[in-house]
Amino acid sequence: MTVTLNIPTELEAQFIAAAQARGVPVSDFLRDFIVEHFQEDTDDLGTALERLSDPQPGLTSNQLRKNLGLDC
């Protein structure tokens, strides 16, 4: 797939510098960047949906302190 993006000049310069620092073409850097961040967001969304489908009771601050061994 080919995509055209209009991004601010400052951001474009940062992407170009990052790609050059890694010795890869900007198109490859951007593709990897988008895929990696999309996958992270997809994983986070999946985790959130899973937790929402099976809610667990919350902890009070006192319970949390006790569980962490901070309650003396």
Image (spheres, rainbow, N blue to C red):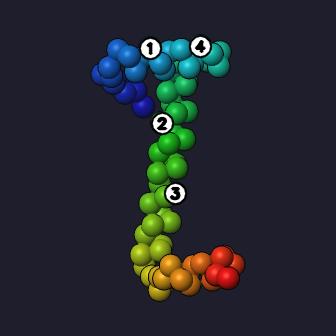
Task: Please say whether residue 37 is visible from this viewpoint.
Answer: yes
Coordinates of residue 17 in the picture (x, y in percent)? 53, 14
Question: Is disc 1 placed on a helix, strand or loop?
Answer: helix
- Residue visible at 60% across and 78% down? 65
- Give the amino acid type for the residue marked by disc 2 in the picture: Ile
Label 4 and label 2: CA atoms lie apart by: 17 Å
- Residue visible at 35% across and 14% down? 9
- Residue visible at 44% across and 14% down? 13
Q: Which residue is mark 3?
A: 43
Label 4 and label 1: CA atoms lie apart by: 10 Å
- Give the amino acid type for the residue marked by disc 3 in the picture: Asp
Mark 2 Cα-neighbour bin, 10 Å: few <14, some 14–19, many ≥20:
few
Label 1 and label 3: CA atoms lie apart by: 29 Å
In front of the other: label 2 or label 1? Answer: 1
Nearest the eye: 13 or 24: 13
Residues at discs 4 and 2 in contact (Cβ within 8 Å): no
Earlier residue among tags 2 and 1: 1
Question: Is disc 4 placed on a helix, strand or loop?
Answer: helix
Q: Which residue is mark 2?
A: 34
Q: Which residue is mark 4?
A: 20
Earlier residue among tags 4 and 2: 4
Label 3 and label 2: CA atoms lie apart by: 14 Å
Q: Which residue is mark 1?
A: 13
